Image: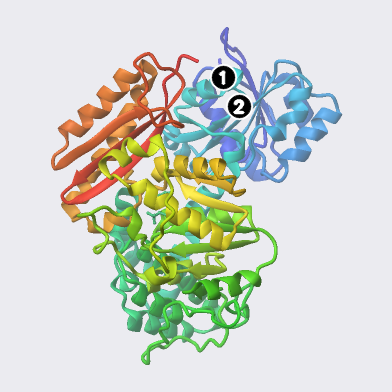
């Protein structure tokens, strides 16, 4: 006799609302785990066929009947249908107290199930990061498949257990993380299909038969490389800075005719994104990036926002580079990509600022920009109407024998990277403009500046605060954004603003890391390939310390130390578990939050990194 008619004790009666691909497959897996499937809705013929194939013997019922009979209601309906369905059933009084209501929408958390919760039901949201065919082929795909799980803390284990029962791997996700999580998956999985199809259509239009035969080995290798090595494995004309080839590609795709217009647009868009990523990762220089971006510019009128131009007189071009003569790109008289105004002097800065009404956010940098800096820019854009980025390598914060002269400088590259990033003004003074006279009044940063970074780099934070105070005074922003990568600097800037009543909001932004964990830094450009691998010891040590932090200060430090000591070619400067505010070392029995910070030399490059830890016990 089938398990659908004789449930064993302790097992649930499962009802499926929407026997689509996901619903039928999950219900099949729940049934295999011993639960009884008491009914399914199946409106289309395809759904009825799926019920026959994957859920034999399960009655096809109305939605209300399914909800009435089930202890666990599986809502596997399209995302857009879900809110009305849940509310409608609530209006009809169909939800039951204690009933488990599980939906599988990636986009929604449990808020969409609020009407069911109000009736006493237990809302759970699970979402398999997998694409389904709706056939028995999918049953294997569930094994080890990551599922995003969202639920209130007391009932989270129920959702996790359900996922484990169907063979999946639960990954807890917050309610507000779900839309972006879902967008990321859709972008990767769905748009990959479009991309492969575009490549296939272009090959077909060129006269290549069976394009799949050509694409399969290449695309499989590329996907494999991207998943393992991230963007490091990227090859092709963009990372070679080969503008001529990119221009020729655009011309060739344009010649394939209007049916392939979307392929040309897709190529242009992704090549632009690839250029910015290659620039941010230091794979190409600023001048090459600027030339590529010029060739790849959207033709006027082709994109939303086309026709916008740079911000008025004095606006810099991305790198002052014109499109090369061999460029086959369509002529573009207006760019869709807004370029920041470049201000080299205080006067130019004042003029540019005067043209910006509303709130202003400031991001201070030393240039050689990377994605970590761009995350600050993104945060700044969310907080204000206008964004000013300063680019200045401040001599006052470098000690004797440090890398002031060697520090990477690439203003063209920085401007190219900031073009289109929503930055209004780039303030890039030279030394004479920044310090017209030797500053006589100096800032004493106090005791926090004497530990960790300050102990190794005496005078460093005094120099940092001097320039921070100066640029804050010149820009007068409403908010200034700093990275948690330099946690001690961030703490000192907060103190500066508090103690001197500077009246600016200070916003901290989490550390951006490479896919393998290395914290992004302009100084990573100094690392050889071998050193870069060795440098991973820093983030690995912090992760080990964080994982062990529940066992207390000593356990966390020991776990991190073990990793650093086992690492070749890594000379630790300090490893410390400190109070996140005072930066003083935490005593052995400390509980609550801490900051695990490390500085180490890999070859001649000094790197820093940190992570928040939870010492438990609160
Ligand atoms: P720098 O150019 O190194 O002086 O950094 C300028 C700002 O960017 C500082 O507030 C840094 O903390 C921040 N920053 C640098 N690297 C990162 C990163 N990997 N993630 C987040 N912020 C960063």
Characterize the local packing of mark 1: few (<14), some (14-19) or many (20 or more) Cα atoms within 10 angstroms: some
Q: Residue 422 at what x, y percent from top left? A: 56, 65
Q: Is residue 87 left or right of residue 375?
A: right
The residue beneath circle 2 is: 151
Disc marking residue 158: 1
In this rendering, is residue 314 above or below 502?
below
Question: For residue 350, what is the image quadrant?
Answer: bottom right
In this rendering, is residue 134 above or below 74?
below
Q: Residue furthest right?
A: 92
Task: Name the one closer to the observer, 121 or 554.
Answer: 554
Ligand 1 is within 8 Å of the C-beta of the residue at disc 2: no
Q: Residue 222 at what x, y percent from top left? A: 32, 58
On the question of residue 210 being in view, the answer is no
**Circles 1 and 2: CB atoms closer than 8 Å:** yes
Question: For residue 400, what is the image quadrant?
Answer: bottom left
Task: Name the one closer to the observer, 403 or 569.
Answer: 403
Tell me the element at label 1. helix
């Amino acid at each position: 006799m089938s398990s659908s008619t004789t449930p064993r004790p302790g097992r649930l009666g499962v009802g499926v609302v929407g026997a689509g691909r996901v619903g039928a497959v999950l219900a099949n897996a729940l049934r295999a785990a011993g639960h009884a499937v008491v009914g399914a809705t199946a409106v289309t013929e395809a759904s009825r066929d799926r019920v026959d194939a994957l859920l034999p013997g399960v009655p096809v019922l109305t939605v209300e009947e399914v909800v009435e009979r089930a202890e666990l209601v599986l809502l596997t309906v399209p995302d857009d249908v879900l809110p009305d369905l849940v509310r409608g059933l609530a209006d009809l009084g169909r939800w039951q107290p204690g009933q488990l209501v599980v939906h599988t929408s990636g986009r929604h958390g449990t808020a969409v199930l609020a009407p069911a919760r109000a009736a006493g039901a237990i809302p759970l949201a699970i979402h398999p990061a997998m694409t389904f065919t709706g056939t028995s082929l999918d049953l294997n795909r569930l094994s080890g498949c990551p599922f995003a799980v969202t639920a209130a803390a007391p009932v989270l284990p129920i959702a996790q257990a359900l996922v484990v029962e169907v063979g999946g791997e639960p990954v807890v996700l917050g309610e507000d993380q779900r839309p972006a999580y879902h967008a990321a998956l859709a972008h990767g999985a769905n748009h990959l299909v479009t991309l492969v199809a575009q490549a296939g259509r272009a090959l077909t239009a060129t006269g290549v038969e069976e394009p799949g035969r050509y694409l399969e080995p290449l695309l499989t290798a590329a996907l494999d490389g991207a998943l393992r090595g991230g963007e490091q494995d990227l090859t092709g004309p963009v990372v070679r800075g080969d503008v001529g080839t990119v221009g020729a590609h655009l011309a060739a795709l344009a010649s394939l005719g209007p049916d392939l217009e979307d392929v040309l647009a897709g190529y242009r868009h992704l090549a632009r994104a690839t250029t910015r990523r290659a620039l941010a990762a230091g794979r190409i220089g600023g001048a090459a990036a600027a030339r590529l971006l010029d060739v790849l510019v959207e033709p006027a009128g082709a994109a939303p926002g086309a026709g916008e131009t740079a911000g008025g007189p004095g606006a810099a071009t991305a790198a002052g580079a014109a499109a090369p003569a061999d460029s086959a790109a369509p002529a573009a008289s207006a760019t869709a990509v807004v370029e920041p105004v470049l201000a080299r002097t205080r006067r130019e800065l004042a003029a540019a600022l005067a043209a910006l009404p509303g709130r202003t956010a400031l991001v201070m940098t030393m240039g050689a920009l990377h994605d970590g800096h761009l995350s600050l820019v993104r945060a700044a854009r969310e907080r204000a109407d206008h964004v000013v980025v300063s680019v200045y390598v401040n001599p006052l914060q470098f000690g004797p024998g440090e890398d002031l002269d060697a520090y990477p400088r690439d203003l063209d590259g920085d401007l190219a990277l900031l073009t289109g990033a929503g930055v209004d003004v780039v303030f890039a003074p030279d030394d004479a403009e920044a310090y017209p006279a030797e500053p006589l009044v100096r800032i004493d940063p106090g005791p926090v500046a004497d530990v960790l970074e300050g102990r190794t780099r005496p005078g460093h934070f005094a120099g940092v605060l001097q320039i921070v105070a100066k640029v804050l005074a010149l820009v007068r922003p409403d908010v200034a954004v700093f990275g948690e990568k330099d946690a001690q600097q961030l703490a000192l800037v907060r103190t500066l603003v508090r103690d001197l009543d500077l009246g600016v909001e200070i916003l901290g932004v989490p550390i951006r890391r490479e896919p393998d964990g290395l914290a992004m830094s302009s100084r990573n450009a100094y690392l050889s390939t071998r050193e870069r691998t060795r440098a991973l010891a820093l983030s690995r040590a912090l992760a080990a310390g964080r994982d062990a932090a529940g066992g207390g200060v000593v356990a966390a430090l020991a776990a991190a130390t073990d990793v650093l000591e086992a690492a070749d070619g890594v000379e630790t400067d300090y490893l410390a578990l400190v109070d996140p505010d005072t930066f003083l070392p935490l005593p052995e029995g400390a509980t609550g939050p801490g900051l695990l910070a490390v500085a180490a030399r890999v070859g001649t490059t000094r790197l820093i990194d940190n992570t928040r830890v939870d010492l438990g016990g609160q």
